[in-house]
Image (cartoon, coloured by chain):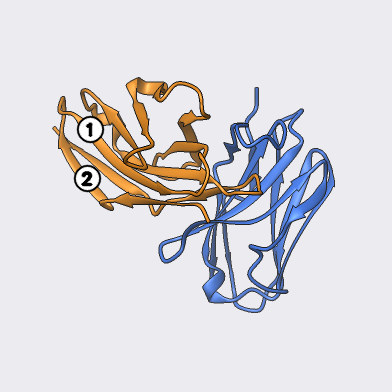
C-alpha cells in the first residue's frame, strides 16, 4: 500500500527564513509524488510533482522538492519565506493500481513578520 | 479559462434533508474526482469518473451518498438524508485524462453544514 506521512502539523518560520516541510512516503514501487497548497477558503493548487524524471523538482512560487529514494522522502523547501506563503500544504501520492491521490494530513505554515 | 466550478459555495441544511452539490469540470477534461475534507479524516477521495463513467466509488461512505455524471460538463454529489457528520468541505477536481501524472485541478469547494 502507498501512503505519505507529513511530519509536523504546524510549522512557523520568520519571513525570509528557509521553509522546510517534511513528507515521507511508503511504497513498494517507485511512486508519483505531489505537493499541493491550499490557501484559506480555496481549493488545492498543485505546487510540483515527481514523476520519475529528475529527482529535484522545481515548482511554482519558488518551491522545490527532492525525491530521495534512500530516505523515502520528498521534502518541500523554499529558500526564503514570504508572508504570502502562509497556507496549508499537502503531500500526496498516487495509489497503486488507481489514479486517485492519497493525501497526507497537511502542514499549516505560518510566516512571522 | 474558467477553472473547476462548484456550487453552491456554502450550504447549510438540517438533518434529514437532501443535499445536492454540483460541479462543472474544466472543458476538455475527461476525468472528475469528488473529495471530502474534514478535520478528523483530512482529504479523502469519494468517487471518480472517467468519460462520465464511475471508475472507483469505494470511498463513498454509505448508501446515503450518490454521485452522477450525466455528461462531460456536469456532475452531482447527492446526500440523502443528510446527517451532521456529513458536515465537511467537498471538493471536485478534474484532469485531462487518467494518467497518474495528470495534474488534478481543484474547484473552490462547497462547505456543507448539517445542523
In this orientation, which residue lies closer to the viewer: A65 or B75? A65
Colour of chain B as rendered: blue
Q: Quarter holding the C terminus of chain A?
A: top left
- Residue B1 coordinates in the image, percent (x, y): 65, 22
Left or right position of A11 against B109:
left
Badge 1, how many Cα within 10 Å: few under 14, some, many 20+? many
Q: Is residue B113 above or below residue B56?
A: below
Dot 2 and dot 1 residues touching (CB under 8 Å): yes
Residue located at (34% from left, 25% from top): A63
Disc number at residue A19? Answer: 1
Q: Is residue A103 above or below residue B67?
A: above
Q: Is residue A4 above or below residue A71?
A: below
Q: Is residue B7 above or below residue B26?
A: below
Colour of chain A as rendered: orange
What residue did someone put label 2 on? A11
Earlier sequence position, callout 2 versus callout 1: 2
Amino acid at each position: 500500500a502507498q501512503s505519505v506521512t507529513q511530519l509536523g502539523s504546524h510549522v512557523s518560520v520568520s519571513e525570509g527564513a528557509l521553509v522546510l516541510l517534511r513528507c515521507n512516503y511508503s511504497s513498494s514501487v517507485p511512486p508519483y509524488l505531489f505537493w499541493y497548497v491550499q490557501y484559506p477558503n480555496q481549493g488545492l493548487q498543485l505546487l510540483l510533482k515527481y514523476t520519475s524524471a529528475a529527482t529535484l523538482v522545481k515548482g511554482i512560487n519558488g518551491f522545490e522538492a527532492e525525491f530521495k529514494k534512500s530516505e523515502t522522502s520528498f521534502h518541500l523547501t523554499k529558500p526564503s519565506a514570504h508572508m504570502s506563503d502562509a497556507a496549508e500544504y499537502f503531500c500526496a501520492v498516487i495509489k497503486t493500481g488507481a489514479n486517485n491521490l492519497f493525501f497526507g494530513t497537511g502542514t499549516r505554515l505560518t510566516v512571522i513578520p | 479559462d474558467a477553472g473547476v466550478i462548484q456550487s453552491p459555495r456554502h450550504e447549510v441544511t438540517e438533518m434529514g434533508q437532501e443535499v445536492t452539490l454540483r460541479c462543472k469540470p474544466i472543458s476538455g477534461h475527461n476525468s472528475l474526482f469528488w473529495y471530502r475534507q474534514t478535520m478528523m479524516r483530512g482529504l479523502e477521495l469519494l468517487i471518480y469518473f472517467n468519460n462520465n463513467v464511475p471508475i472507483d466509488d469505494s470511498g463513498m461512505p454509505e448508501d446515503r451518498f450518490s454521485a452522477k455524471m450525466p455528461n462531460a460538463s456536469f456532475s452531482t454529489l447527492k446526500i440523502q438524508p443528510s446527517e451532521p457528520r456529513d458536515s465537511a468541505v467537498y471538493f471536485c477536481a478534474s484532469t485531462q485524462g487518467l494518467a497518474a501524472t495528470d495534474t488534478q485541478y481543484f474547484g473552490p469547494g462547497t462547505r456543507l453544514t448539517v445542523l
